[in-house]
Image: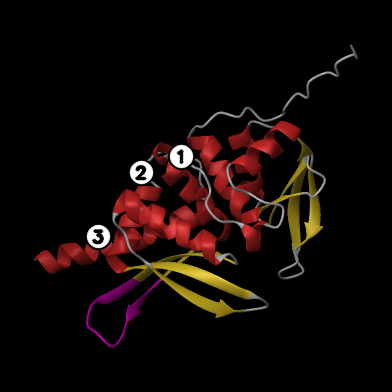
Amino acid sequence: MGLRGQKPKGKVKIKWSPNFSYAIGLLVTDGCLSSDGRHILFVSKDEEQVKNYMKALGIKVRVGSTVSGHNGKKAFRVQFSDVLFYGFLLSIGLTPAKSLTMRNIYIPDKYFFHFLRGCFDGDGYSYSYWDKRWKSSFMFYIGFVSGSKAYVDWFRSTLWRLSGLTGHITKAKRKNICYQLKYAKQEATTLSKLMYATKNGTRLTRKYLKIKKTLDIVGNQLKEERI
């Protein structure tokens, strides 16, 4: 009988929690699985984002730098080897060429909105403005972007199942075809409150403060309408 090799030890504790789910959201948007079957890569222009990612996974690794393929600017880069975590990510639906091949991602319902907050901090966006065509009309939108239509469809249907929000999907062509799932006005307001329902949940400060400012305007507008 041959000798058994030592079982690999994982750097990441694989256990669902708010932080762990948030980190999965970041990986779905800004992460990458190497084709070697063991390395996980994460790139972000925000140093706070990188710190949040490592804190959420409970890892301490060296932070390097790279040049963003989107705009040529410097970005922070975290890479580590963990065969067990890599296998787990494959088992829940991530793929090495995730931007085009992702479909359903397994996230326990209990933690979905923590995952969603991670996705928002990754590739999500929000914007708002006063519509000059209508008196006191304040517009507010939240959106998510992906190159995989199947993933966007899953994301939308899961959000609808858990919150009743419908949103709408648009198709755009930048360098490649991408799909945007967008929520407007009242749905964007409700979605914001669901994302930030946990008071001290891990989050990217600049995006949170932007949403908070928008919600303050929405709240003041509603007060004025009641007067």
The crowding category of the residue bearing disc 3, from other C-alpha atoms within 10 Å (few below 14, some 14 to 19, many at least 20), is few
Question: Which amino acid is tagged 3?
Answer: Gly
User: Is 11 placed left or right of 203 in the picture?
Assistant: right
Labels 1 & 3 near each other (Cβ < 8 A): no
Q: Is residue 117 left or right of residue 140?
A: right
**Amino acid at circle 2:** Ala
* Among the 4 quarters of the image, the one containing residue 88: top right
| Residue identifier under label 2 | 197
Magenta-tinted stretch? 128-139
Residue that lies at the very extreme toward the left in this rendered image: 227
- The percent position of residue 96, horizontal first and vertical second, equals 72, 52
Q: Residues within 10 Å of mark 2 (few under 14, many from 20)?
A: few
Q: Distance between the Cα atoms at labels 1 and 2?
A: 8 Å
Residue 132 painted magenta: yes
Q: Which quarter of the rendered picture does the N terminus lie within?
A: top right
Q: Residues within 10 Å of mark 1 (few under 14, many from 20)?
A: some
Residue to which mark 3 is pinned: 219
- From the top left corner, tell me how far across and down residue 53 is, in percent: 62, 42
- In the picture of the structure, the residue carrying the numbered disc 1 is 201
